[in-house]
Amino acid sequence: MVLPLGISFYTFQALSYTIDVYRGNAEAMANFIDFSCFVSMFPHLVAGPILKFSFLADQLKNRRLTSDKFARGVAFFMMGVAKKVLLANPCGKIADTAFDAGSIQTLDAWFGSFAYSFQIYFDFSGYSDMAIGLGLMFGFVFAKNFDSPYLAQSITDFWRRWHISLSTWLREYLYIPIGGNKGALSRTCANLIVTMLIGGLWHGASWNFVIWGGLHGGMLAFERSQGRKGVYHNLPKLVRIALTFLIVTIGWVFFRGGTLRGSVQYLGAMFHLNQPFPNAALIGGLIYKPYYVLSILTAGIVVWFGTQTWDWSQQMTWPKTATCFALGWVALIVLATQEYNPFIYFIF
Amino acid sequence: MRPSTEYRLLRRPTTQAPLPKYSLPRYADPTPSAAHRKLPREEEADLALKNTKFTPGTRQTLIALFLLTIVAVPLVQLVGEFRAAGSISRLPMISIFKSLPWLPHSEDLKRVERTLENESLVSQWLLPRVQYLLTVLLGAGNEQVYLGHDPWLFYRADVDHVIGPPFLDPVRMKHRLQASRVQPDPIKAIVDFRNQLAARGIDLVVLPVSVKPSVEGEMLAVSNANRTQASGALPNPSFNEFKARLEREKYACSILRGF
């Protein structure tokens, strides 16, 4: 079936408008052009962030376009392009080789799954940076969508940092209406699982996304049942971060796997439960190339030790301006040599 | 001088973010890295994005370089084409757009886009140089080729076929059918083709040939153990079944390097 680009984001935007107006959180728009502008605002249209109507309603009518905003938007945009082309795309090549293989050796499978974790983060946060940058160039302010998610110390913490516009949307318009935490602990846990299952299904009608949502919902419910300090609290911070990253990475296997059987086989390879085909011996020669190893190391450094674009671009100095354009131009030059490289979230 | 309220709000946190209070974040919650500001995410964004500090001159440079980035490629193209053609009306870039119908279809737009890419002077200058860097220095290969040792080149489609899932796997064939709406089983397709030719009095001889990476795999593998493993024949897992089924269909099959 042919569907318009970003259909689910359109739907979220329209729902946000309808519910906010129904609840009295915002006034209905009298001008259809303003409404269309809200629903189909191109900078964030195809892959988010999802904007809450009540936040944007005022900006649609009263906003100021300043050179400060435009210049900051440029910095965001160039860094977003660099994230996508210089980090997400090479990590994506590793992940594609690993996940599309018929069978794979254990070490290669882990390398491929870490590569996908980095790919999806830099792809999506790169897009969000570009959307925020483009928005700023037109005078709009969009809220942060990612906040160093791989520094999360629990799955609950992860969902405060990953695709924040989706997690807040799910809470506001789904979790709370179905009961939220108003009830026994078991009911709250069930609500969390249902919310995340539906959140998973939003990504696509496939068992893979249901399992991915179920895994996250189950972990949220489990952590909720353990109380505020949680089961990891006595572990060192580094272990908490590593453990959370590991759980998230395992979840991404279902997200990327394509089919349930493929995902289970891939997980089997990661935990050395399958005997790989002899031709899996070739995969190492394709993914441990200097370019890919360099990309994944840089991605790891940026993820765990880097500064977010928001903080980095808060004070624009000459060296930062030079870095911004050096990275952006290199990214555009590399992009010119590549074929079509869509963003992962374009399909949702 | 006492720092302003806004500046104090924008300072980096000195303490660790508090433990999450809710399982899913509220709109009123600050982001974890800005928890010290105690501002909703949207107000935090408003504050952060409207209070950028620029070293004198950087703001104008950012804007100017961005606009230059947008216009540079078409400008180079126009100047390059004008020098060659000598007249604006004969510029290839203009004629590419002139070839578009009034109501272009997606195919028309794709054709124009592809032509612009192919004719781009900047792209023609950049492509070999960037590919040299990526391939020779960083070993990345390109969209068509994987780089092996010494340096051997392997056609990407061949390698993907060899390391890919068994091509006769029923689940894979079902997906292939859904994706391309063609006969997904190569044996059935070959038999059908044979029958069509036979109706015209023509014999079909099929020669299954193993691709380069399946016979020269050691030139791709990295570790010694993998090179040893790859020094033998490494066909796609379905290749032997494919050959056996072809033989059952009474075809003349030549066999290469142990296949």
Image: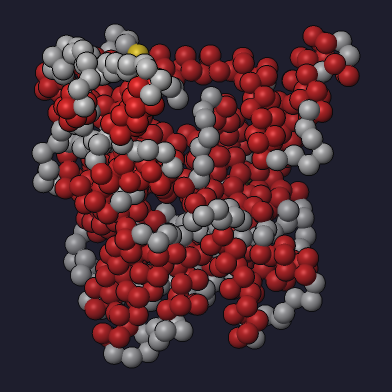
Please state the horizontal and vertical placement of residue A101, each as a whole percent of the image.
27, 36
Please tell me in which quadrant of the rendered image residue A180 appears: bottom left
The image's colour scheme reads: secondary structure
Please state the horizontal and vertical placement of residue A37, each as a whole percent of the image.
72, 62
Please tell me in which quadrant of the rendered image residue A302 appears: top left
Would residue B53 appear left or right of B91 to someone viewing this image?
Answer: left
Please state the horizontal and vertical placement of residue B198, each as a whole percent of the image.
35, 22
Q: Nearer the viewer, residue A268 or A90?
A: A268
Q: Nearer the viewer, residue A201 or A132?
A: A201
**Residue at 66% across, 40% down:** B106
**Residue at 29% across, 16% down:** B205
Q: Quick one: which residue is furthest to the bottom in this view? A: A183
Please state the horizontal and vertical placement of residue B33, each as a whole percent of the image.
44, 60
Would residue A101 appear left or right of B44 to someone viewing this image?
Answer: left
| Res B226 seen here | yes
How many numbered circles does the render carry?
0
Q: Is residue A322 above or below residue B81?
A: below
**Residue at 64% across, 52% down:** A43
Q: Is residue A244 above or below residue B126?
A: below
Would residue B13 appear left or right of B77 to someone viewing this image?
Answer: left
Please tell me in which quadrant of the rendered image residue A122 appears: top left
**Residue at 80% across, 72% down:** A31
| Res B65 seen here | no
Q: Is residue A329 above or below residue A142?
A: above
